[in-house]
């Protein structure tokens, strides 16, 4: 059964953090525009945005060692860390605007202050961490970072990790108290609820099946109502594909040349979870280690305090796995059906280049629970199997494309935005740092896809994001002012906040 065609200004595909962020921005900038959201699942934020499907880290490069690369001369390149941190400051500003405008009532429901630590062992790694600390701690974005290789100090910082530690291997950590734990699932639901209150048409259990251009340059989107089986057709001047792992297939359906020669490789994520209060209450931090030699950047091990549904728990991982599905709720045919004539050579080239990744995934799949526990005991020496359970944290589709630097079939480990030349459609692909930089990414999409409106929108954008168009790195006074204001608005300046939950 097919229903008639309806017309709207904007269609957002997927009700995750990306669509929720873009929709909220657009409703502030163009409140009269009509917006429709199509989500194939029964509620918002159920895939990658869900709080159990990501680590909940406010990625700002405070502890993630993969954002700081050691050069051949042993110096540390912090340029990516600066970039990621500044992008997170943009998210903090937008979230603060939402709180101050009463569009979000209680920031405690989605963001909590939590120390971020980097942890290493072994003489070479300790020396690297010290050089990293020296490079970062002199930068205003990383003010307040501390370094220690003193075991008594470390026992104060990370008591659970130091308890029962008998190894004489050199050990060190950096600590910075301005880190955060972010419940992106809760934030997504808040934003979607706000959009619904703004008369945005949110349609759950509606799966997008096809997209094509109309004669006037708009997009016709064919949507199936999962419950009734009815097929609907909707046209829009602008379409955003924010469907997580499902974005690649939808991008391919558009036929735009910018979507050619791009492939995807799915990687599953698994975490160990502890909810035993006796264990959980001994750890209060996000602690990131260093990936083992040959492991991909996404495999950096970390032990995280999490706040989910007003309950404190610990997560350790991720352990990688493989499934051909592009979404947790996807199909086993997702990977094979994503291979097209235009990206076949790109995918084949990646297969040859990434043999080591394939071996790594096979090794990870073969791990028993006890073997995973042994990796956990590198962080928590006294960890007992009965205190920890396994949780499947969903799917991430890593982008494969041809690049100048890496050549044909290069596996990307970041976030990728693909836009049509005329700005009528945009798609978001990839993974980390993802949700943490959602506001920055959506501002880029606004600039690329709505250049005719940006000048008129700029005053409102600056009201929402005071640093818009300005480098915080080059404006230290503004950086300090914004950091103080956002900390206050988001409740991050109250050191007792975490103890109240």
Image: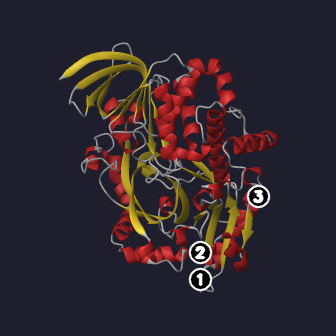
Calculate the distance from the C-alpha at mark 1 to the C-alpha at mark 3: 27 Å
Q: For numbered disc 1, what is the local secondary structure?
A: loop
Residue 180's x, y, as percent? 62, 53
Give the labeled residue for mark 2.
161
Calculate the distance from the C-alpha at mark 1 to the C-alpha at mark 2: 8 Å
Quarter of the image with the N terminus in it? top left
Residue 440 sits in quarter: top right
User: Which residue shows up at 77% across the image and 51% down it?
Assistant: 140
Q: For numbered disc 2, what is the local secondary structure?
A: helix
User: Which residue shows up at 32% across the image and 39% down it?
Assistant: 342
Question: Mark 2 or mark 3, which is nearer to you?
Answer: 2
Q: Are marks 1 and 2 in contact (CB under 8 Å)?
A: yes
Eyeballing the image, is 285 above or below 383?
A: above
Can you name the residue that lies furthest to the left here?
Answer: 1
Eyeballing the image, is 170 above or below 346?
A: below
Residue 261's x, y, as percent? 37, 41
Tell me if 383 is positioned left or right of 482 in this view. left
Q: For numbered disc 3, what is the local secondary structure?
A: loop
Q: Which mark is residue 165?
A: 1
Can you name the residue that lies furthest to the top here?
Answer: 216
Q: Which mark is residue 53?
A: none
Q: Are marks 2 and 3 in contact (CB under 8 Å)?
A: no
Counting residues from the start of the chain, the first of labels 1 and 3 encountered is: 3
Residue 320 sits in quarter: bottom left
Tell me if 25 is positioned left or right of 76 in this view. left
Q: Nearer the viewer, residue 115 or 126?
A: 115
Calculate the distance from the C-alpha at mark 2 to the C-alpha at mark 3: 22 Å
Q: Which mark is residue 144?
A: 3
């Amino acid at each position: 059964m097919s229903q008639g065609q309806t017309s709207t200004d904007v269609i957002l595909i997927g009700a995750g953090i990306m669509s929720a962020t873009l929709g909220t921005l657009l409703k502030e900038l163009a409140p009269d525009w009509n917006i429709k959201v199509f989500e194939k699942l029964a509620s918002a934020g159920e895939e990658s945005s869900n709080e159990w499907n990501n680590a909940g880290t406010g990625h700002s490069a405070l502890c993630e060692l993969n954002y700081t690369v050691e050069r051949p001369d042993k110096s540390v390149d912090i340029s990516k860390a600066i970039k990621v941190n500044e992008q997170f400051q943009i998210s903090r500003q937008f979230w603060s605007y939402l709180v101050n405008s009463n569009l979000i009532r209680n920031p405690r429901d989605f963001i909590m202050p939590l120390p971020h630590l980097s942890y290493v062992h072994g003489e070479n790694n300790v020396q690297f961490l010290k050089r990293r600390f020296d490079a970062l701690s002199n930068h205003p974005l990383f003010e307040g970072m501390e370094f220690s290789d003193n075991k008594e100090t470390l026992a104060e910082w990370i008591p659970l990790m130091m308890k029962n530690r008998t190894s004489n291997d050199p050990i060190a950590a950096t600590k910075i108290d301005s880190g955060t734990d972010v419940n992106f699932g809760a934030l997504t639901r808040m934003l979607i609820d706000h959009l619904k209150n703004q008369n945005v048409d949110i349609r759950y259990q509606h799966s997008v099946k096809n997209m094509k251009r109309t004669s006037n340059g708009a997009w016709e989107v064919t949507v199936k109502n999962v419950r009734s089986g009815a097929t609907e057709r909707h046209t829009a001047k602008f379409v955003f594909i924010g469907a997580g792992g499902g974005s690649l297939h939808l991008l391919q359906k558009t036929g735009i040349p910018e979507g050619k020669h791009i492939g995807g490789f799915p990687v599953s994520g698994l975490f160990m979870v502890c909810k035993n209060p006796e264990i959980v209450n001994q750890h209060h931090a996000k602690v990131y280690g260093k990936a083992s030699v040959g492991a991909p950047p996404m495999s950096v091990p970390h032990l995280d305090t999490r706040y989910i549904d007003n309950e404190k728990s610990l997560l350790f991982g991720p352990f990688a796995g493989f499934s051909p599905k592009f979404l947790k709720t996807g199909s086993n045919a997702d990977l094979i059906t994503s291979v097209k004539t235009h990206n076949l050579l790109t995918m084949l080239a990646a297969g040859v280049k990434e043999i080591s990744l394939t071996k790594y995934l096979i090794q990870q799949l073969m791990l028993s629970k006890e073997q995973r526990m042994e990796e956990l005991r590198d962080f928590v020496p006294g960890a007992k199997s009965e205190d920890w359970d396994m949780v499947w944290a969903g799917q991430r589709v890593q982008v494969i494309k041809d690049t100048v630097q890496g050549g044909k079939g290069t596996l990307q480990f970041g976030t990728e935005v693909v836009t049509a030349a005329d700005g009528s459609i945009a798609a978001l692909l990839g993974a980390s740092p993802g949700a943490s930089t959602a506001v920055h990414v959506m501002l880029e999409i606004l600039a690329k896809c709505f250049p005719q409106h940006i000048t008129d929108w700029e005053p409102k954008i600056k009201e929402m994001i005071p640093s818009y168009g300005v480098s915080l790195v080059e404006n230290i006074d503004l950086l300090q002012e914004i950091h103080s204001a956002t900390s206050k608005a988001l409740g991050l300046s109250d050191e007792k906040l975490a103890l109240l939950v």
